[in-house]
Image: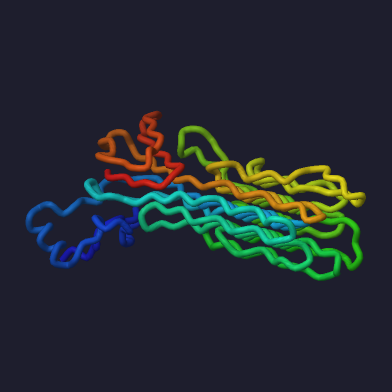
Amino acid sequence: MNRFKGGIRSATGATTSNTSAVGKWTLTEQMQNRQSGSWPGYSILVEYLVVAGGGGGGGDVGGGGGAGGLLNNTVLVAAGLSYTVTVGAGGAGGTGANNGTSGSNSVFSSFTATGGGAGGKSNAGTGSSGGSGGGGGWANTGLTYSGGAGTSGQGFAGGNGGGASGATSGTGGGGGGSSAVGAVGKTGSTGIGGDGTSSSITGSSTSYAGGGGGGAYNTTYASGGSGIGGSGGAVDIPGSVTATPTAGSTNTGSGGGGGGALSQSGASGGSGIVVVKYADTNAAASSTTGSPTITVTGGYRIYKWTGNGSITF
């Protein structure tokens, strides 16, 4: 008896259920399809990259947004079955003295990358957990506000935010990245975002999922991870804005920068992406939705989505 329920099979032999309705088979259908010779074979080896949306930075010396979760692996798929693609949006930055918003999940079939955690606001905000965790907000009360946890196999934790009681300078914690934790934000330090991950799945080396930098008060602004995470804003003691927070790079799943003091808002996280790649000795996909960018180069067929869709191999 064939035990597979349809959908997708890992290259190591493990199976998971396809989220697409046409990829699910009952036991009766399995037996009928096998007897008729129409049971789909898991014969196409696919590499996939799934990156969720990055988290938004917290406001008012807030923590940087965490990078969206990143999944990169290979799997065997079946010709004739449809596989769902979902591309997560980046989370909004915290307006004024508020926490940011976490990013949204991205999906290829049954593989889900978790949205990046939001950065916390100053003096009260812990970072949210996510694919990578958001940074904690800075405090001049002597308290520590924790960075959010990352998801195992997808990203790292955000840096804690904190500072000495009565301190007059510091930054929020950096958002976690897909390759490193975010830096701690405290008196006199810079809460740099955690580094992202480089991938050549599209045919050229590109970085994805960097953490956002923490917002700064009376000190140098914090940069984002790998140059794709948003940088934090900065405000000096007289109340002059010396840097405006920037958003995580579009379609990299990177976190947004935290806002500086005096209720400066945080920046939004970058949207995610889904990429599928397989040898061009296999036929082109029989159908796609969501208008993916399709490239045939270096012996591979490459499908890249920046919006929701599907693919039938």
In terms of image quadrants, where is residue 207?
A: top right
Left-right relation of 110 to 137: left
Left-right relation of 22 to 147: left
282 and 163: which is toward the camera: 163
167 and 10: which is toward the camera: 167
Q: Is residue 182 visible?
A: no
262 and 13: which is toward the camera: 262
Q: Is residue 152 visible?
A: yes
Report the residue at 7% width, 55% height from top.
36
Q: Position of residue 256 (x, y in %)?
A: 65, 49
Residue 268, above or below 301? below
Looking at the image, the residue that sits furthest to the left is 36
Report the residue at 21% width, 51% height from top.
41
Quarter containing the N terminus? bottom left
Left-right relation of 227 to 291: right
Report the residue at 53% width, 42% height from top.
251
Q: Position of residue 178 (x, y in %)?
A: 58, 52
Residue 29, above or below 56? below
198 and 291: which is toward the camera: 291
Q: Position of residue 281 (x, y in %)?
A: 28, 34
Q: How many marks?
A: 0
Q: Position of residue 133 (x, y in %)?
A: 62, 60
Q: How is the image coloured?
A: rainbow
Report the residue at 42% width, 39% height from top.
304
Quarter containing the C terminus? top left
